[in-house]
Image (cartoon, coloured by chain):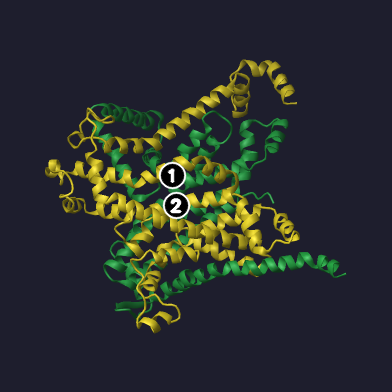
Amino acid sequence: MENTKKKHKKPSSFYRRQDRWALIMMTPWFLGTLLFFLIPLVQVCWYSLNEITLDLGAVNQSWVGLANYNFVLRTHATFYQELITTFMQAAPNTVLIIFFSLFAAVLLNGKYKFRGAARVLFFLPIVLATDIISVNLATVSMDALEGASSTASTADLTGAMVIVNFLIEGVGLPMELISTLLGIIANVFDTIRLSGVQTLIFLAGLQSISPSMYEVAKMEGATAYETFWKVTLPTVSPLILTNLVYTITDNLMRTDLIDMIRTTAFGQAQYGYSAAMSVVFLVCTLAMIGLASLIVGKVVFYND
Amino acid sequence: MTKGKEKSKAKNPALKRRLPRTFDEWSIWMRRKGGGFFMSLLRYALIICIGQIILMPILKMISASFMSPEEVGNPISTWIPGTFSIEHLYVAFKLLNYPKALVYTLATTAAQVVLQVLSAAVTGYAFARVRSKKLQKLFVIVILTIVVPPSVLMLPQYLFFRSFDIFGIIKLITGEPLNLLGNPVTLYLLDIFGMGLKSGLYIYIFRQFFRGLPRELEEAAHMDGCGFLSTLFRIIMPNAVPGIITVGVLSFVWNWNDTYYSNLFVGNRLNLMVRLNQVSADMTNTLWGINRQIPGDFYFMHTNQLYQSSILTSSSLLVVLPLIVLFMFIQKRFVESASNAGIVG
């Protein structure tokens, strides 16, 4: 009798127990969020409205209202320009990285010889994604260019100039387009370096498309081109949003702006200004992510 | 059906004579003329080109490290050194205090990885399985922690660790709050509480992963009288190996390469990245600082730009070497688990 009763109640008691345990498991994270995220977030906003001085072990505050923001945005010599350039650079970089990583994932997907080697090669940048080393690498490749410039690459360079001249004068392409293209080419190393994780995410998405979808497309007589646009792209489109958010945050983690915020606080002891800079930076970041996800959210296709 | 369609197109004389115009016609044409061959050729060509861009700097680094100092910048030996020498590597080795620093960095990074993976797995599992809607809504905060740049919270976190105290307990015992700055415990604390470097992302990955595991697993375990914790450790965790590998590798690599947290909270010179940062900031002085430990043949070059940049390159090589070795060992598992089960779920 009791046995059947228990059996009847089982699912709900099981789920209740699971919920209880989930709550317990979440507690450390929740404490951490409170302690290291939510409270600091409020604090930084509060600091930005105060003048802060540090004594031994104590934080002295005096209310100054919006004066810090006023200084940072109007009077500060470089912050505003730095802010604008950071975000102006982040936008095209993000678009380039998304396109390149999708391209790379499509390239890596499928069956071919040396697939394992190709994947290892493309994911190497994840391992080597570090600022100092990349700076070194950039200088090394510049050195390589300079070292060879005496002989071989002068020829290359004139060759490139001839092509550029031909494109501008012969074909009649506008100068702006050419310079944008040249900028993209000059950035190609950075783009590739920063798109390892995104490629991985896209590749995972491509692998999760069931083969029967492609079979159906083939049966219906779709070409490879149509299959890509009608099957592949819609299925990975939710991942574009994921990647977009990841790319923007990743890009903004490694800007000169952060160095500026740090030196203002710990180099010049201007804690109030630093906090104001942080808040401005945060608002801009959130605005950019919101805007980007609004735009991309319109074209995302959910298959639920 | 496909074949029939192609055949009818092949018989159509109009299509046969003129060159294909639209992309669709091209792809049909390519398919008929053995386009698969060209396509795979194109694929290999692109992979080789991009691979070359990725590999070239690393090869260049290796080549520069093994060049002898007189030879740097010599146009005759851009790639293969004329005389092999480990002078650069030796100086870099001494500069970084390599064996000691390697052990220290490995130990701290490994500890961080374990803590981060554990906390992210537990939290991610909880978020994947919790049924109450209120708790599910808390996941928005996880997204927020991913999106908010950590540098925004730099100042409050710094001050928090500068005078660390829990409800005034430590002040009661020792008379003053604890200064945790300069101690790797700061990083461990952040990791345990799921707020370390990119912890939000790991929680997200684990949540997606655990949502992909069928609930029937736990229900069956429950039916068989398995308690919650033993279900977690005997049923769920063994099934979560791909997720653990994905997050573990990412966490190791990013913690190893991280300069932000380690500079701000710890700044220990034994951390390889921190040391590399210091070295690159003031090359001349750090070189003079160790001049008793290295053979004196190249004292006269210490202020030479090219020499300094070669030393820096060799140091970078030494710093990333463990990562490359690790990646070589684990690449197959990593690529498989990350692309099959990990992130998308």
How packed is label 2: few (under 14 Cα within 10 Å), some, or many (20 or more)?
Answer: many
Query: Does residue B205 lie above or below A12 as drawn?
Result: above
Q: Is residue B125 visible?
A: yes
The reply to whether dot 2 and dot 1 touch (C-beta < 8 Å) is yes
Pick the residue in front: A293 or A161. Answer: A293
Which residue is denoted by mark 1 in the rendering? Answer: B326
Q: Chain B is shown in which shade?
A: yellow
> Taking A217 as reference, is A72 left or right?
left
Pick the residue in front: A34 or B316. Answer: B316
Q: Chain A is shown in which shade?
A: green
Q: Quadrant of residue B183?
A: bottom left
Residue at 44% x, 72% y is: A40
Residue situated furthest right in the rendering: A1
Q: Quadrant of residue B13?
A: top right
Please tell me whether mark 2 sits on a helix, a strand or a loop: helix
Q: Is residue B343 visible?
A: no
> Taking B332 as reference, is B126 left or right?
right
Query: Does residue A63 lie above or below B296 as drawn?
Result: below
Which residue is denoted by mark 2 in the rendering? Answer: B252
Residue situated furthest left in the rendering: B300
Q: Position of residue B179 (x, y in %)?
A: 34, 73
Query: Residue A83, labelled with which disc?
Result: none
> Mark 2: which amino acid?
Phe
Q: Position of residue A8 (x, y in %)?
A: 83, 66
Q: Chain of mark 2?
A: B
Q: Position of residue A266 (x, y in %)?
A: 30, 67
Query: Does residue B147 lie above or below A131 as drawn?
Result: below
Please tell me whether mark 1 sits on a helix, a strand or a loop: helix
> Mark 1: which amino acid?
Leu
Q: Chain of mark 1?
A: B
